[in-house]
Every structure is written in C-alpha cells, then in structure tokens.
Image (spheres, grey):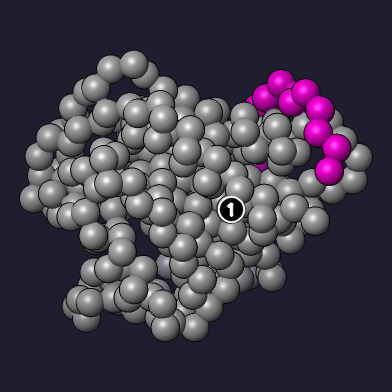
Amino acid sequence: MAVGVPAFADPVGFPGAQGTGYPWVEQVTADLVVPPGDGKRPALVILHGSGGIDGRGAFHAAEMQRRGFATLEVLMFPPGGRPREGHHVNLTHAYGALKYLAGRDDIDPGRIAVMGFSFGANLAIRTASAPTREAFDDDLGGLRFAVHVAFYPTCWTHARLQTNPRHPQFGTFDRLTGAPVLILAGGQDDYGRPDDCARFARMLEDKPGARIDLEFYPQATHGWDGQTDRERFIYDAMAFEGRGGKVRLTPDPEIAERSRRRAADFLAGVLEP
C-alpha cells in the first residue's frame, strides 16, 4: 500500500445511525484524515474517552495514517458531557461513523475498524455484540466493523451483562459479530480489578463469533497513553467497580508506544491486503 504524508484533518458531519431501542442524534461531527494514495483504503473510527477529545486519538491516528489508513475521530460529547445513561447512548455516533465511511468512494466498506479509549473503549467492545449490531440493521444493512480495539475499557461493566439476569441488557454478548477484538488493559487501573478483562475474555471465549485477544501491561494505570507529562487524579463514580473514588492517570511513554505499535500491528494484520 502506497503511503504518503497524511493530509490535514477535514471537519465532516453526518447523521447518527438509527437503532431499535437506542437513542439517536441527528448530526455527528468528526475530523477526517485520508492519506494520499490510489484506490480504496482501510479506515479507523476513533472514539474518545469521558473527558472528550484530548490528544490520545491523534497519537494513535498518526501511526495508522502512516500505514495508509484513513482516520475519523468522532466528537461524541464535550469535556464534562459524558452521558449519565452509559456508553450505549453513543452507539448512534459509532455506527453513524461506520455508515459515513462506508459511503465514501475512497474507503473500503469491508475494512473499517473501530478504536476507543476508556468510555470509547466500552463502545469499541459493545459494537462487537451481534445483538447490538442487529438492532441497527435497518440503517446499516450488512455493514459491521471489521476489527475492534479497546484501550483500558471497564470490563466489569460488560461482564455484568452476562452474569446479572436482572440487567435490562442481559445476554448482550451471547453472540459476537465474528470480527477480531483486541483489549489492552493495565494492572494498575483503578476502575476495577487487574484481572477484570481477562475474566471477561474467558467469559466470551466459547460464544459464537468470539475472537478475543488480550494485551496486559501489569504496571500501567488507566490512561497510560495520555499526552501529558504529569500524573493526575480524577474522581469517578464508576471507579473501583462502581464504588467510586479517585482514579490515577499516569502517562507512560514507553508503554504508550508499545501499545500503539501492538494495536497498529493488530489492525494492519487484519485489514491490509
């Protein structure tokens, strides 16, 4: 694949996708970069964390653009605007981005991936659920994400959808779409226990369509690829498996680069021709 100097980001807008039983937004905004080259390219939808767009997306997008991928970083909400109802509110944004890219002449609709961080990582995992994806069938037709990459998701929130029969979304992961999923997790993440993502991955390994890879960094906190030079703490009611508390965010440039390369290699390994 020919790779040149990435183009500048273009602001774009498109309708949110409509799904049965899920909220809908009329208009979604995003930043699109399409590297120079001929033919249809693979593309990556990037979903930010609960603090809004903060530089992590650009950090990972630069590597994928270097490899010839188009990137689309979606604005789901501004800083402080995380929906109280949960990440499922923003499925309309994620699937709307998929439909928008699939409709472009320069994008291969069968090679569109999704990557998310924290809140966005939960969406990257949720969109691998076949029942969730099927709720959007009337709008998306046969479209689906070809790869899912989730940086430090709160895996315990997904596990409870399989273990709590009283949850209204119980059984969400009884079937998966068949697309490969890479979860990158840290052993010092204050949102849950160190083995939360490993337990969730084991929970899914025998489900139809499950293709789960886990990359674990024992010394990494939540947000290890933050594009700042200082540690900080935030309070989140979802920390410590929903008990609430302060969450450490310790940037680690070495782990950030390793994880960026791991994710990029995973994406390219599936999507490059």
Say how many tags the image has. Answer: 1
Identify the residue shown where x is 31% and y is 64%.
198
Residue to which mark 1 is pinned: 266
For the N terminus, the quadrant is: top right
- Return the x and y of residue 105 as percentages of the image width and height: 85, 47
For the C terminus, the quadrant is: bottom right
Which residue is farthest top? 229
The answer to whether 270 is drawn above or below residue 6 in the figure is below
Identify the residue shown where x is 13% and y is 49%.
240
**Of 270 and 40, which appears nearest the observer?**
270
Q: Is residue 231 magenta?
A: no
Please tell me in which quadrant of the rendered image residue 54 appears. Answer: top left
Q: Residues within 10 Å of mark 1 (few under 14, many from 20)?
A: some
Looking at the rendering, the stretch of residues picked out in magenta corresponds to 1-14
**Of 107 and 87, which appears nearest the observer?**
107
**Of 185 and 37, which appears nearest the observer?**
185
